[in-house]
Image: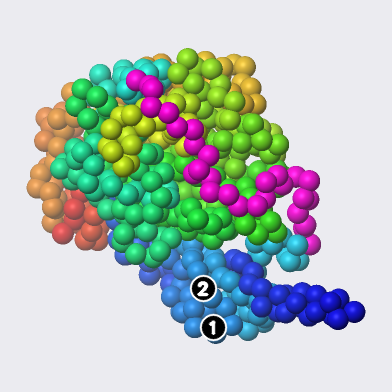
Amino acid sequence: MKNLLLFLFLMISFQIVSQEDAWVFLKDKPNKTTFLENPLSMLTQRALDRRIKLNIELDEIDVPIDEDYYSQLKNETTISVLAKSKWLNAIHIQGQVNDINSLLSNYSFIDHIEFANKSLNSSGKTISKSKIINANHHNKFNDVLTDFDYGEADNQIIMLKGNYLHEQGLTGKNQIIAIIDAGFPNVNTLEAFSRIRDNNQILGGYNFADRNDGFYSRNSHGTHVLSSIAGYLEDEYVGTAPDAKFYLFISEIAETETVLEETLWVEAAERADSLGVDVINTSLGYTTYDDPNHSHTYEDMDGKTTFISRGAEIGASRGLLLVNSVGNSGNSSWKYMGAPADAPSVISVGAVNASGAIASFSSFGPTADGRIKPEILGQGQNPALINYSTGNVTFSSSGTSFSSPIMAGLIACLNDYESLVNAAVYSNESLKEAIYKSADKYNNPLDQYGYGIPNFETAFNSYLESLSVIDVSFINLDIYPNPVKNTFTLSTDDYSNLKIEIFSVLGKKVSEKENIFSNIINISSLKSGIYLMKVSKDNQQKTIKLIKQ
């Protein structure tokens, strides 16, 4: 009887002190007008330029979380604030269930609360243990297979016809790639990364896991991932986008597996967006956690349930190209992709071996709502990488963790084409469609294979057609002076049939001129600021940044 009472006492005590994870979703953003009128207070000019190019307007989603709301919750003594997301207007907290629930009545600005433990939510949704396999944590990065008998990077690039892009001069020079991963030790010292260091291609980074600037730290997984894109050893090794620039973000806490990592990833993606990043590679995926009550079911793999996948979809709507490993669960009883690979707009990448045969560990689709996943495949079984400790091309690991960045680098190279031409329409969806259609199983996709292995030569030619490339003779058109006071002059003798459209940095059209009778254009009605001017004629078009004094 004493033992039973002791057991009950311990159980009650555990319930009293146990901490739960939850997201507090806020009702509004009171200062949204101020931020939208001053977009450079929340996004860099490069980020704004990307939005304008893709015709994506800024909106309330881009506005930061209200500082007053955040401060009030941060000062709340009954809970701990761990992270936040402006895209979802949510704050990640920990605390006891009663204390978390009491926030709804204490703070009028809270819309609703979602617990990571779904059984605590008002819907009463519970986790079916039969649909969660291996829920106990293990270090996911210990699962890689290692050997030292393989060639250089040729096969993993030529398999995808990535060499064709490089031959066109598309090496990622005008692209910024963010790697969101578990750590980047020795990237600041290894010879294989000296090229990107010496050329100032590492633009910065942040360690969200430890809340500091020490991103050359933690788990070596990110170093190996980065090497497949940016590594360079003369006559020995070349990554898939050797001239791209990079931000390095740590969101993964490798020694544990907690739902906080989903929120940290969203924070990192938001940072990447604000800095004008073009492509994000994520060689991470989330299905199970140390606390099995937080783990996801297959039904959650619908692209709209998990916090991280909801964030990924918003990121794509901001113009980011998101590339994600589909996962290494193909041989397990779970076997399916993880989040955010399930998100509709994420390019999910599976793995093949050097011969192009599917790697058995590569995770399966479809998503819970029946969509094809993965979309495409790259070499993930024994690809050539850089050993983070020796710096040699003698370290090989297997996993979709590496097929994903190999692919992300080539996607950035293809996207780099936009920087070299003027086009009528830019579209991430057109780029993705060109890649998918070039794959060898596009007309007969399979659950583990997806659309298959893409051909970037075919994708390039298809994407070129979709861009409606402009006659190069029109590229010589320019304006002067710039900055402009009230009028500027078009540097062309033939201004007949020109159409001029001027857009604000928010992507809104503020002026339009047709049937022009002079090459001197008056913009005195516009306020001072930065604008984007599109000049078009027939099937020709050029975009010029305009500064109004």
Q: Where does the magenta region start and end?
A: 124-151
Q: Which mark is residue 374?
A: none
> Is 130 a magenta residue?
yes
Residue sitting farthest toward the right:
1
> Upstream in the sequence, badge 2 or badge 1?
1
Is residue 266 or residue 18 the one in the foreground? 18
414 on left or right of 95: left
- Where disc 1 sits, the SS reads loop
> Residue at position x 72%, y 47% from top?
132
The picture quadrant where one finds residue 27 is: bottom right
Label 2 SS: strand
Q: Quadrant of residue 126?
A: bottom right
Q: Nearer the viewer, residue 131 or 4?
A: 4
CB-based contact (under 8 Å), mark 2 and mark 1: yes
Amino acid at pointer 2 = Val
Residue 158 x/y as whole percent: 36, 17
Please, which residue is most extreme toward the left here? 481
Q: Main secondary structure of the magenta part?
A: loop
> Label 1 neighbourhood size at 10 Å, few (<14), some (14-19), many (20+)?
few
Q: Residue at x 51, y 23 (%)?
A: 352
